[in-house]
Amino acid sequence: MTHNPLAPSWLVEPDDANALAPGLWPSTAARAESGELQIGGVSAHELAQQFGTPLYVVDERDARERAGEVREALHYAFAQIGSRAHVYYAGKALLTSEVARWMVEAGCRIDVCSGGELGVALAAGVEADRIGFHGNNKSLSEIDRAVASGVGTIIIDSIQEIDRVAEAAVRHGARQRVRLRVNSGVHAHTHEFLATSHEDQKFGLTLEAAPDAVARIRAFESLEFIGLHCHIGSQIFGSGGFAESAARLLAVHKELLRTGPVAELNLGGGFGIAYTSVDDPTPIGELAEAIARIVSDECELLRIPIPDVAFEPGRTIIGTAGVTLYEAGTTKPVDVETESGTKTRLYVSVDGGMSDNARTALYDADYSVRIASRRSDAAPALVRIAGKHCESGDIVVSADYLPSDVEPGDLLAVPATGAYCWSLASNYNYLGRPPIVAVRDGRARVIVRGETEADLMARDAGLDGR
Ligand SMILES: *Cc1c(COP(=O)(O)O)cnc(C)c1O
């Protein structure tokens, strides 16, 4: 089969454009006898009928089990080296009260990075001391609220923040546990826009600046220094970046031990998931073991006790649990001249777009797509799934193959949209943000309702009372 030059080099025409590639879909996703996609025992058709499209569907069982699996894997690997691992679910990936409870019930703590996220976690009943609070520019009132509510740790991101947190702690008669965010200088292998540990960036302090900053923290009675924190980026495959980062951090960790206790080391999040059939993320058990081994080896080399460690996975816990359902609208074969002649790309427009999934436009992210409402024997066609916004960059799935008879009214499913889709959603072009529905054991329930036109107009002061 010759490769379609309009398709990216990694995308191979599948034998069966109905197949659900392993690793991309929630664990309960399957095609029913009828050919229809089911998630959590609920058919795509039923979901669309009941809740409309676009629709964020979250497989509750998958999310809970994955959270447990990630926590267990890290727990186990670090127990093997005589240490303990704490797992903070990175709330920014997808935070609703329901999701927060699933994470807590799976044994995870919760990371938040704004007053709003903190508010949701607290309202969901998450114990404050199981919350980590991030951010490079926390406001004074956010700091005050975090300290007042008793959050477990605040991740300090600048020199100014040391004094701010210390003062808030004094005000509330608290001794606030804090970490210090640093950059290890490790460039995670990822898209430039996603990397957050380059030196030329807004987060954290350099490793060289850490000892003075920690001395300053320790000078405050109202602060308790817990350890260093580093997040090397996102959608990382393999353990190499974590290993290198851990080694660099531990060298400074050792230096800090000379002047006081350092209980923990926080290695951040960033474990990658599969968005397309060619993505092959390392199993979490293997990653956990490899990172534990490097931490153990490095501590032995440095002759320091192995600290407790903390991780902050988001995407790897919730990403694959989510699927977005759309209804196909207009289709448009577009002929494109290439060196090997005229080739056709079939544009399929859906009833959502960059407002419910900004990642393709924002990061050039790759996604996959399948027809959810039926199976088809039609030959595969190269498609591009476009949204309905007034923007040519409004693409949901840049390239995949679908049965060529895909037509208006078909339901389409885009997998791996559990993380950073709803949380990055907007009302661009006055589209209401879709609801999130949790499915489990044949039942579906709304966990966040969708926005109505009335919601969209409610804050327009010129429409007061209408
Ligand atoms: C975004 C972020 C995470 C989570 O990243 P994932 O790629 O979703 O695992 C964890 N920690 C920090 C500090 C972050 O900014």
Image: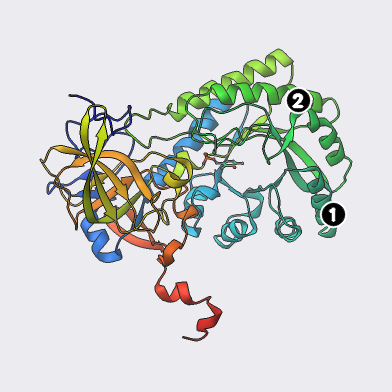
Q: Nearer the viewer, residue 281 or 198?
A: 198
Image quarter for ligand 1: top right
Q: Quadrant of the N terminus?
A: top left
Measuring 21% from the left and 41% from the top, which residue is drawn there? 402
> Does the image show residue 82?
no
**Way the structure is coloured:** rainbow
> Does the image show residue 292?
yes
Determine whether the beta carbon of the residue marked 2 sits less than 8 angstroms from the nearest atom of ligand 1.
no
Q: Position of residue 456 (x, y in %)?
A: 46, 72
SS at mark 2? helix
The crowd level at tag 1 (other Cα within 10 Å; few <14, some 14-19, many 20+) is some
Measuring 26% from the left and 31% from the top, which residue is drawn there? 338
Q: Position of residue 151 (x, y in %)?
A: 68, 52
Mark 2 and mark 1: Cα distance apart in space: 27 Å
Q: Which residue is mark 1?
A: 167
Q: Which residue is mark 2?
A: 252
SS at mark 1? helix
- The circle drawn on residue 244 is none
Q: Position of residue 377 (x, y in %)?
A: 10, 40
| Snapshot quadrant of residue 145 | bottom right
Amino acid tagged 1: Glu
Q: Give the left or right position of residue 68, taking residue 227 as reference.
A: left
Measuring 73% from the left and 57% from the top, which residue is drawn there? 139
Q: Give the left or right position of residue 20, taking residue 404 as reference.
A: right
